[in-house]
Image (cartoon, grey):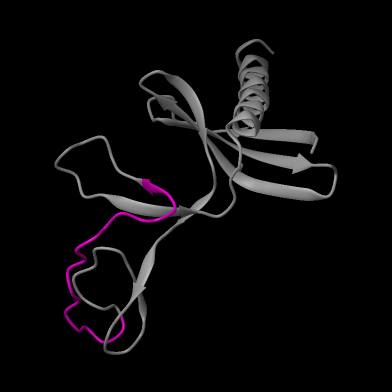
Amino acid sequence: MEITEVRVILKDSPDKKLKAYATVTFDNVFVVRNIKVIEGTSGLFIAMPSRKVKHPCPKCGFKNELRSKYCNQCAQALPVEINTQSAYSARSTQDAGASQAEHKDIAHPITQAFREHLQIRVLETYEQEKNKIEHP
C-alpha cells in the first residue's frame, strides 16, 4: 500500500499538545482523516482517529458515554462499570487524579512497521508545513 498524499492542517495554539490534524490518502483511492499530531513527553507522535466508547442504558437502551452516572435519555442511574479497559484502544490522561476517557480507534495500522512508516510521512509533512509558516 502506497501513501499517495499527506495533508496537514496546523493548529493555532502553540502551548497545547495537539499540534495538527492530518489527512492521508492511500493508493489514490482511500482517505483517512483526523489523524492527530501530538507533542508527547518524548517528542511528536501521531494518534489515529477515534471515537468515545458508549454503553447502552439498561432501562431505555440509549447509548451514553462511558462513566456517565445518569442516562441522558431517561435519567436512570447507570451501573458503575467494573472493567473499564477497552479491548481495542484505551487512552487515559496523564494526570493520575483525572477521569479516564476511553476511545476506540476508527482506523489504525495493523503492523508496527506500517505504523512507523505512516508516522514518519505525517511528521515529515508536519515539519514542512510548520517551516512554511515560520520561513515564508
Q: Image check: 2 left or right of 130?
A: right
Residue 70 lies, in percent from the top left, at 20, 75
Q: Residue furthest top?
A: 135
Q: Nearer the viewer, residue 36 or 114?
A: 114
Residue occupying image coordinates x 39% and y 30%: 16
Q: Main secondary structure of the magenta part?
A: loop
Compared with 102, 22 (above or below) is: above
Q: Nearer the viewer, residue 78 or 75?
A: 78
The image quarter containing residue 74 is bottom left
Compared with 122, 89 (above or below) is: below
Q: Image check: 50 left or right of 121?
A: left
Q: Image check: 73 left or right of 45?
A: left
The image quarter containing residue 40 is top left
- The N terminus, quarter of image: top right
Q: Nearer the viewer, residue 96 or 125?
A: 96
Residue 52 lies, in percent from the top left, at 41, 59
The image quarter containing residue 6 is top right
121 drawn magenta: no
Q: Nearer the viewer, residue 74 or 16?
A: 74
Q: How many marks?
A: 0
Residue occupying image coordinates x 73% and y 48%: 31
- The C terminus, quarter of image: top right
Residue occupying image coordinates x 63% and y 29%: 113
Residue occupying image coordinates x 19% and y 63%: 82
Q: Which residues are magenta?
A: 73-90
Compared with 53, 36 (above or below) is: above
74 drawn magenta: yes
